[in-house]
Image (tube, grey):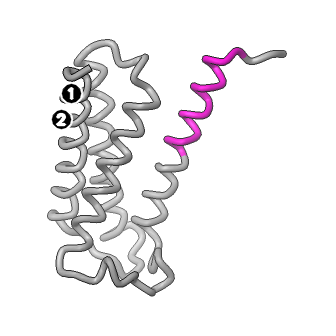
Amino acid sequence: MKINASRWYFLLRTVAVMIFLILITYLSLAAHPLGGNTPWILKFRGSDKVAHFTLYCLFCLTVIWAYRPFIRNKKTFLLIFTFIILYGILMEVCQGWVFPVGRTFEFLDIAANITGVVIAVIVYNSYRKIL
């Protein structure tokens, strides 16, 4: 059975989304996701919030890149990004109460996640209008 090019690209894009999802899940739930050694570039106040913002912004952009051909209306667009935001909230809840691994639940982490998603949507819409 031969897979045509569009199905192959769809599969690769889906794999990219899944890898990103696994990465976020691991970084959210592991006790010491970086092996306990924080790189010097991440040793500043608020670096955790920057990491949350960056990961969710990049994840959202990856989802847009992967599934853009299937996002045909605003309802679908909002549904996808609502699920991303709910996933971020779920990861925070799991950190604090479900898998207590020395990590804590913080509303500011949720705010950073949501901000990352919102900025990704703004960047996408700006990019789409430019082209």
- Answer with left or right where residue 5 lies relative to residue 34: right
- Residue 102 is drawn in which quadrant? bottom left
Nearer to the camera, 107 or 112: 112
Quadrant in which the C terminus is drawn? top left
Residue 43 percent coordinates (x, y):
28, 83
Q: Quadrant of the N terminus?
A: top right
Residue located at (45% from left, 80% from top)? 32
User: Which amino acid does the dot numbered 2 rest on?
Assistant: Ile
Residue receiving disc 1: 125
How many residues crowd mark 2 within 10 Å: few (<14), some (14–19), many (20+)?
Answer: few
**Position of residue 63 measured from the top left corner of the image (x, y, whole percent):** 40, 35
Is 41 in front, or is 91? Answer: 41
Tell me, for residue 122, which label it has, or none: 2
Q: Is residue 47 above or below residue 24?
A: below
Residue at x 45%, y 78% (from the top left corner): 31
Look at the image and give the residue range highlighted in magenta. 4-18
* Residue 18 coordinates in the image, percent (x, y): 53, 44
Magenta part, dominant SS = helix
Circle 1 SS class: helix
At x 49% / y 58%, what residue is drawn?
23
Residue 120 magenta-drawn? no
Q: Are marks 1 and 2 in contact (CB under 8 Å)?
A: yes
**Image-quadrant location for residue 118:** top left
Compute the Cα span from label 1 to label 2. Answer: 5 Å
Q: Residue at x 60, y 34 (%)?
A: 12
Residue flagged by tag 1: what amino acid is it? Asn
